[in-house]
Amino acid sequence: MASAFEYAPAPESRSVVDIAPSYGLFIDGEFVDAADGKVFKTVSPSSEEVLSEVAQAGEADVDRAVKAARKAFEKWSALPGSERAKYLFRIARIIQERSRELAVLETLDNGKPIKETRDADLPLVAAHFFYYAGWADKLDHAGYGPNPKPLGVAGQVIPWNFPLLMLAWKIAPALATGNTVVLKPAETTPLTALFFADICRQAGLPKGVVNILTGYGDAGAALVEHPDVNKVAFTGSTAVGKKIARHVAGTDKKVTLELGGKGANIVFDDAPIDQAVEGIVNGIFFNQGQVCCAGSRLLVQESIQDELLDSLKRRLSTLRLGDPLDKNTDIGAINSAEQLARITALAETGEAEGAERWSPECELPSAGYWFAPTLFTNVTQAHTIARDEIFGPVLSVLSFRTPDEAVAKANNSQYGLSAGIWTEKGSRILAVANKLRAGVVWANTFNKFDPTSPFGGYKESGFGREGGRHGLEGYLDV
Amino acid sequence: MSETSSSSSTRLSVFKTYKLYVGGKFPRSESGRVYEVSDSKGKWLANAPLSSRKDARDAVVAARKAFGGWSGATAYNRGQILYRVAEMLEGRREQFVREVADAEGLSKSKAGAVVDAAIDRWVWYAGWTDKIAQIVGGANPVAGPYFNLSTPEPTGVVTVVAPQESSFLGLVSVIAPVIATGNTAVVIASEKAPLPALSLGEVLATSDLPGGVVNILSGKAAEMGPHLAAHQDVNAIDLAGADSVLATELEIAAADNLKRVLRPGAADWSADPGTHRMTAFLETKTVWHPTGSLGASGSAY
């Protein structure tokens, strides 16, 4: 938008990161080619520039990595917890040292603003390793009985929306509890996981304890289905989560699933409007809305709907969309052409089903994958855009009259991951929070994360919790 | 019961018609079907309802209807009601000793020990209702100006495939943890020994337990199980009494709406139950709120 105060470009320097032209799989402490020699390219979603070429894991590579993890398990699990802790502390510290490099790399490969990778992703990644490092020699006190045992080899498959943070959520508790891991990052964001492999080498982590397989869904499926995997941890779509749940039936594999969401952000008539608007913007436009716990349904009390929407639209008009490396950028690129197509199609469905579409005036760059911040009004609970997870910067606005109606609408979803409540009345916060069927409830705030705080969903948003003491359970034989 | 009149008396004993326990009522199977239940020596004991898919669906409706009230009851209240179940059982101890002895082919003294253990198990879980949240929940020390609290909540309606061999202690050991935490249950009793379970329904009905919190069906797990495992309004399933083939089939069906699944394990029902049968059917909810700030200096006191 035209503004009295234009910002000069303030790009973060790319020179802090050195991306090699090609990378192998990280198996048993070495970077190796895929058995069949396949490779694929990873591009920067904001420019479509090819960043690097990485090995594409197949079934043989999965088997090799699982064997390496199995071999490493005996010694790793037998290490005193205090020694495992020190490896994890080392990793946490190296991540802190290299955080600017990793933030720039993540922004390049993922398309999210540097403001987010620098101030949210990377600090949380380091904190997560630091937190679980401390658990490694205190497991007797975690509430799972004396001397709880690890499961063995963990097969972990993570998404592209928070590549390094999801890696941290998976690897830190697994290693702290004495498991070894084979992790497959998403095909569109393989680079930070490969840099993490290098950090494992710098930390002197024993070979085979962490193995990184870049590749596509077939490699993820092969990993999940490998008979010598004891634990499956998956973050991604509910459809794939259900496939995994079917696959592990009748096996001894322990599973945790962090899946989709359609979070309701409920604004009552006594809410501080300006703060609520900031929370709504954070809830649905953080990371371009590509967040499983996004507040993608705005439930606003009817009496303040017009006032709130006016403020919200005014605020959206000030969001800066563009170069993710620019420190002033609020909205970065959509992660892939495929995801952009999905968002586009769902937004078109919203219009076709009769909802009213609005976006601020917003110039999209000519190269790369972009989607303007969008909100829909006149949305009913039956609309596709009120039910399906869009995983993009698209907000569906619904209204309500009473707290009961707000709760009923919020819970009217197959999902149950997150919810928000905005009101100045304490008793109402507690009453509504109590009734919401969601794993995380943010009251007068939104999208807050912390390694000490368990995260995970009700219903079809998955099961198990990541973070906090609760996050240990998924990696212990208890 | 098959106990007929003794030769010295002309009085015929009164048989009991064993019925299901659904929504606080005692219906027959809507299918009109029954099957013969025999003791361990093959002697006829009674006819039990052979529940149908429709009975199972009715039980889910009853369990869902009861969930709001039961999960919203205070933990103290739930504890008192579970303790009341123990009290009621103690008073009907002899009946259950006889039924368990018949069902499992045990001597009177061994059956007595089983019933005592089952009564004590209700007492154990009665005491857990208002403690489990302190064991598995709590405040999280987040790195920021936020109050952050994790609390356990019941997952919802739980289908329980009760143990086949341990018709009473096993049964109580799987029902009590499910309802102690505020869930409601649809229970498939032991197929060949359902009578103690059906009689338990009569005890639950007189223990102030709201109707629908526990629903007990007799019949074939292999017939009802798949429908309950696939039911979209069931949140979880305990496979304790399913054999490995059925357990796998039910776990696959349960994936359709991502039910929480407790797989069958080697079960010693007389051992310390631990907490895992409760935590298996608990969700963790974490609520955040900003704490605000009173300024950097704070109070000196």
Image (cartoon, grey):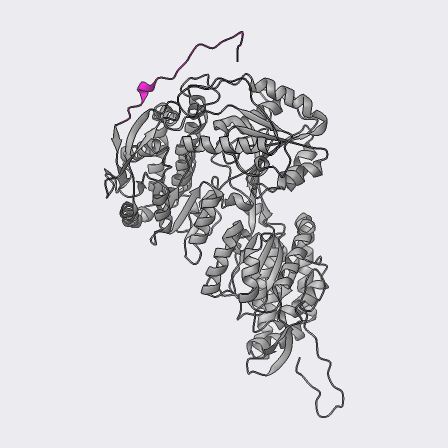
Above or below for A340 versus B240: above
Is residue A3 located in the magenta-colored stretch of the structure?
Answer: yes
Q: Is residue B17 left or right of residue B225?
A: right
Residue A141 position within the rendered picture, expressed as x and y whole percent measured from the top left: 46, 46
Picture residue at 53% right of the left edge, 71% below the top: B165
Please identify the dominant SS of the magenta region: loop
Picture residue at 48% right of the left edge, 17% below the top: A363
Numbered marks: total: 0
In this view, the residue in front, A152 or A334, is A334
In this view, the residue in front, A221 or B7, is A221
Picture residue at 75% right of the left edge, 90% below the top: B9
Is residue B126 located in the magenta-colored stretch of the structure?
Answer: no
Above or below for B293 versus B150: above
Residue B83 position within the rendered picture, expressed as x and y whole percent measured from the top left: 67, 59
Above or below for A340 versus A382: above
Query: Magenta residues, as a range?
Result: A1-20
The answer to whether residue A411 shows anywhere in this view is yes
In this view, the residue in front, B41 or A200, is B41
Q: Is residue A135 left or right of residue A362?
A: left
Above or below for A6 versus A80: above
Q: Is residue B60 left or right of residue A287?
A: right
